[in-house]
Image: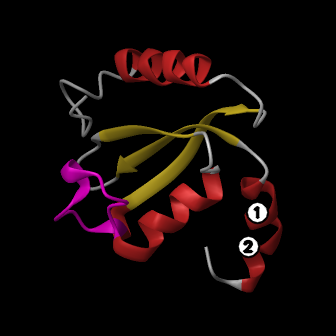
Amino acid sequence: MREHRYASWRTALSSVIGIYLITDTKDGRNYVGKADGGDNIRQRWSAYAANGHGGNVELRGLDPEHFRFSLLRVFDPSTPTRTIDKSESHFKIALDSRKHGLNRN
């Protein structure tokens, strides 16, 4: 996130909110998360880069070197929170990240 070669990505990620996926490539488990409200994708991903878990309990103790980040859906910042919440829930169900992944909720 901090390297100069990612400057254009940082700019792009700062302008959108949405749903993202973190995959632990060591064991294949997924974590579905969202960036909404005052947080954009860049802010959320920067939190993971800073401490390795972004405040998520199930990610603590895992090696962030094995994390792969993907965008699942991007929203305009004016999108209502309930729309983003529905989308996040959809992806948690579709990817079974609660039962076989890293989502607790």
Q: Is residue 41 left or right of residue 29?
A: right
Query: From which residue to which does the magenta span run?
Result: 52-64
Where, quadrant-wise, is the N terminus in this rendering?
bottom right
Q: Quadrant of residue 29?
A: top left
Q: Position of residue 13 (x, y in %)?
A: 72, 55
Under mark 2, the amino acid is Tyr
- Give the residue drawn at x 72%, y 25%: 79
Instruction: Please name whichever residue, 70 or 57, is drawn nearer the observer in this view of the structure.
Output: 57
**Label 2: how many Cα within 10 Å (few below 14, some 14–19, many 20+):** few
**Residue pointed to by mark 2:** 6
In terms of secondary structure, what is the magenta stretch mainly?
A: loop
Q: Are marks 1 and 2 in contact (CB under 8 Å)?
A: yes
For residue 56, above or below residue 72: below
Q: Is residue 62 left or right of residue 95?
A: left
**Residue pointed to by mark 1:** 9
In space, the residues marked 1 and 2 are separated at their CA atoms by 5 Å
Secondary-structure class at tag 1: helix
